[in-house]
Image: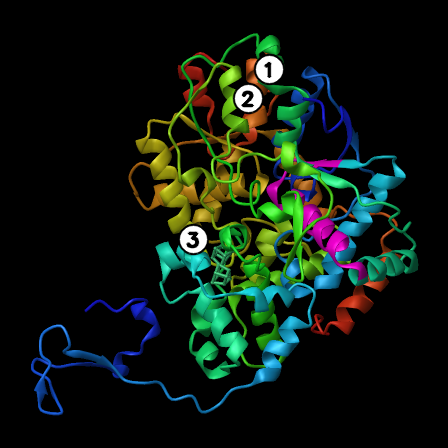
């Protein structure tokens, strides 16, 4: 415990300041309760998500390097992002900056040209779930729980980029065919690649029960193609929702605004089409933790969720 | 006899006979099926070179064709088995452009889940490499416009303009790009939900928060749609970004 740091730069990402406001609000609540401090990254820009990287390599490096530079300016070595896409983008940039000297130098020159401080050091990015797990952990969550989520059966949905790919998020890089130890960084903090369990552990500590959800817990929701390739996304979301429902879940816990939006949007469309077993609502894991810590449904903005988890939570007397 | 990766063999090349006699020997039964050889008459080795020379595509040469990536890929497994990352890498390295073009309708379908990259035993950045293959094909005019590329461009241009994206504008802007008529207010030229054409599912989806009267949420998102959140101190950085993208040939104008 305690390897990442209690005070970190917080990169919320565009989504959390708009449609996923609930995630932002509840994340702040949970962090405060767990005694952790988020230092808002002033004037950040979009990480480029999964889209820009297909259009421009250097441009995407620059977008992320600018955010890293802002974090350095605020005196941080660690950035925490609550979105799978954002944490992936920052980690990807970290990987290329670290393994490719030419990229690093070019990026720094361009940053200078654009009026941004060049990087003296490359800050490391963690997903907020890892941070909560390592800096607070299940024990602390248990201590803080005032209203246990008793009887709530949760399907913990991690999505793709929280665990994948391991060498952006992990210890070593493959530079030019050789496995090089770049620096021993994330080996101790990253979640299990194929069987992630941090969210299960935190929610279980808050009194919830996790249902069996493999392998759908890391199955793609359609992600960056949610809007551009509806047929595929719809099928993937159907598989996820049906597995959750048939395994007895009351609710799906999410940890990425894009996964969350995709699940909710396609859940709605699938229900319109009359597809069976897709009516499990979704909530951010921080919303559920917030409820367990004694906050009201209004505090964690449960009404923002389009899939409306309130009836289920009310039935169990949790909201 | 089972044919492995059946989707890779064109039906014209599969010969199946009830009774088959080769050089006077009756080989009926297990041996009644023949796959005719493939004739390669055009290849372009410069294609692979261009991929190897890009920072995100250089790992392509580490591939030893084990197909772990394909076995992991959800698009291959649950959508269309013609989507085959291992095969795309193979074709790109050999420079068999026409074979790649035959698969243009599925090649863009990668959902960037990174199962392939994650599991590749050789450290190939498979997802990145596939995107570089697509990017290179598009740059050389070897592939038509495909939906995800349109969206990627649309998204990136929004980032370039404002420094940040806004969900509502992204959604309605994309709907407009798909051919729906979106109504825009005359002054700020921003899309106004419900007044124009909206897909039925979206209408119903947006009615929900209105019904549950979540005023704060609505006001926030409406505000963002009218006044796009911006990154301050963006203009100088934007110029550099634009320059870089122009160098890479990534801007359409
Ligand atoms: S898993 Fe890696 S080595 Fe195996 S076929 Fe795919 S890219 Fe090649
Ligand atoms: S990233 Fe693309 S190619 Fe790789 S496994 Fe996922 S969908 Fe398949």
Gap in angstroms between the C-alphas marked 1 and 3? 35 Å
Q: Are marks 2 and 1 on the same chain?
A: yes
Q: Where does residue A242 sit, x and y in percent of width and height? A: 34, 38
Residue A310 shows in this picture: yes
Stretch in magenta: A79-101
Q: Is residue B144 left or right of residue A154?
A: right
Q: Nearer the viewer, mark 3 or mark 2?
A: 3
Mark 1: secondary structure = helix
The answer to which of A281 and A188 lies nearer the viewer is A188
Q: Are marks 3 and 2 in contact (CB under 8 Å)?
A: no
Residue A278 shows in this picture: no
What numbered label is drawn on residue A141? 1
Q: Is residue A148 left or right of residue B6?
A: right
Q: Which residue is mark 3?
A: B72
Q: Where does residue A292 sit, x and y in percent of width and height? A: 55, 14
Dot 1 falls on which chain? A
Against A43, residue B143 (above or below) is: below
Q: Residues within 10 Å of mark 2 (few under 14, many from 20)?
A: many
Q: Quadrant of residue A78?
A: top right
Residue at image point 9% right, 91% down: B24
Gap in angstroms between the C-alphas marked 3 and 2? 29 Å
Gap in angstroms between the C-alphas marked 2 and 1? 7 Å
Q: Where does residue A74 sit, x and y in percent of width and height? A: 87, 36
**Quarter containing the N terminus of chain A:** top right
Residue at image point 61% right, 57% down: B173
What numbered label is drawn on residue A202? 2
Against A159, residue B34 (above or below) is: below
Q: Is residue A125 left or right of residue A195?
A: right
Q: Is residue A231 within the magenta segment?
A: no
Dot 2 falls on which chain? A
Mark 2: secondary structure = helix
């Amino acid at each position: 415990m305690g390897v990442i740091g209690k005070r970190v730069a917080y990169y919320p990402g565009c989504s959390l300041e708009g449609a996923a406001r609930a995630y932002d609000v509840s994340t702040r609540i949970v962090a405060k309760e767990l005694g952790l401090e988020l230092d808002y990254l002033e004037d950040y820009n979009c990480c480029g998500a999964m889209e820009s990287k297909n259009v421009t390599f250097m441009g995407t490096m620059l977008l992320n390097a600018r955010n890293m530079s802002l974090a350095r300016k605020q005196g941080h070595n660690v950035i925490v992002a609550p979105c799978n896409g954002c944490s992936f983008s920052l980690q990807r940039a970290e990987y290329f900056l670290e393994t490719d000297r030419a990229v690093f130098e070019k990026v720094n020159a361009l940053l200078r040209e654009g009026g941004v401080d060049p990087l003296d050091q490359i800050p490391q990015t963690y997903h907020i779930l890892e941070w909560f797990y390592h800096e607070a952990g299940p024990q602390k969550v248990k201590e803080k729980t005032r209203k246990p989520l008793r009887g709530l059966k949760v399907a913990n949905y991690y999505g793709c980029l929280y665990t994948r790919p391991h060498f952006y998020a992990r210890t070593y890089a493959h530079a030019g065919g050789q496995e090089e130890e770049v620096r021993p960084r994330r080996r101790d903090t990253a979640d299990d690649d194929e069987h992630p369990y941090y969210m299960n552990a935190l929610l279980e500590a808050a009194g919830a029960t996790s249902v069996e959800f493999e392998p759908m817990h890391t199955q793609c929701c359609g992600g960056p193609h949610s809007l551009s390739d509806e047929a595929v996304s719809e099928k993937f979301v159907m598989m996820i929702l049906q597995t959750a429902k048939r395994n007895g879940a009351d609710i799906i816990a999410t940890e990425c605004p894009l996964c969350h939006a995709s699940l909710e949007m396609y859940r709605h469309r699938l229900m319109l089409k009359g597809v069976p077993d897709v009516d499990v609502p979704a909530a951010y894991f921080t919303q559920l933790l917030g409820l367990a810590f004694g906050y009201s449904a209004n505090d964690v903005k449960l009404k923002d969720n389009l899939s409306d988890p309130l009836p289920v939570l009310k039935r169990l007397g949790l909201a | 006899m089972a044919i492995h990766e059946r989707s890779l063999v064109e039906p014209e090349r599969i010969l199946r006979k009830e009774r088959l006699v080769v050089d006077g020997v009756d080989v009926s039964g297990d041996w009644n099926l023949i796959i005719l050889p493939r004739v390669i008459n055009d290849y372009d080795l410069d294609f692979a070179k261009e991929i190897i020379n890009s920072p995100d595509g250089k790992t392509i040469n580490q591939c030893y064709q084990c197909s772990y990536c394909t076995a992991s890929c959800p698009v291959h497994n649950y959508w269309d088995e013609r989507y085959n990352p291992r095969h795309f890498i193979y074709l790109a390295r050999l420079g068999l452009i026409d074979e790649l073009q035959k698969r243009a309708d599925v090649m863009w379908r990668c959902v960037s889940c990174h199962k392939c990259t994650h599991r590749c035993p050789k450290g190939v950045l498979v997802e990145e490499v596939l995107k570089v293959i697509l990017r290179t094909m598009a740059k050389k005019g070897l592939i038509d416009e495909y939906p995800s590329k349109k969206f990627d461009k649309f998204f990136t241009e929004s980032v370039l303009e404002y420094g940040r994206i806004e969900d509502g504008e992204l959604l309605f802007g994309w709907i407009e790009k798909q051919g729906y008529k979106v109504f825009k207010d005359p002054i700020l030229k921003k899309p106004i939900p419900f007044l124009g054409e909206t897909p039925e599912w979206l209408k119903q989806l947006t009615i929900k928060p209105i019904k549950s009267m979540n005023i704060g949420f609505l006001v926030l998102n409406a505000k963002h749609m009218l006044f796009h959140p911006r990154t301050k101190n963006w203009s100088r950085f934007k110029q550099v970004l634009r320059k870089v993208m122009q160098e890479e040939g990534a801007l359409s104008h």
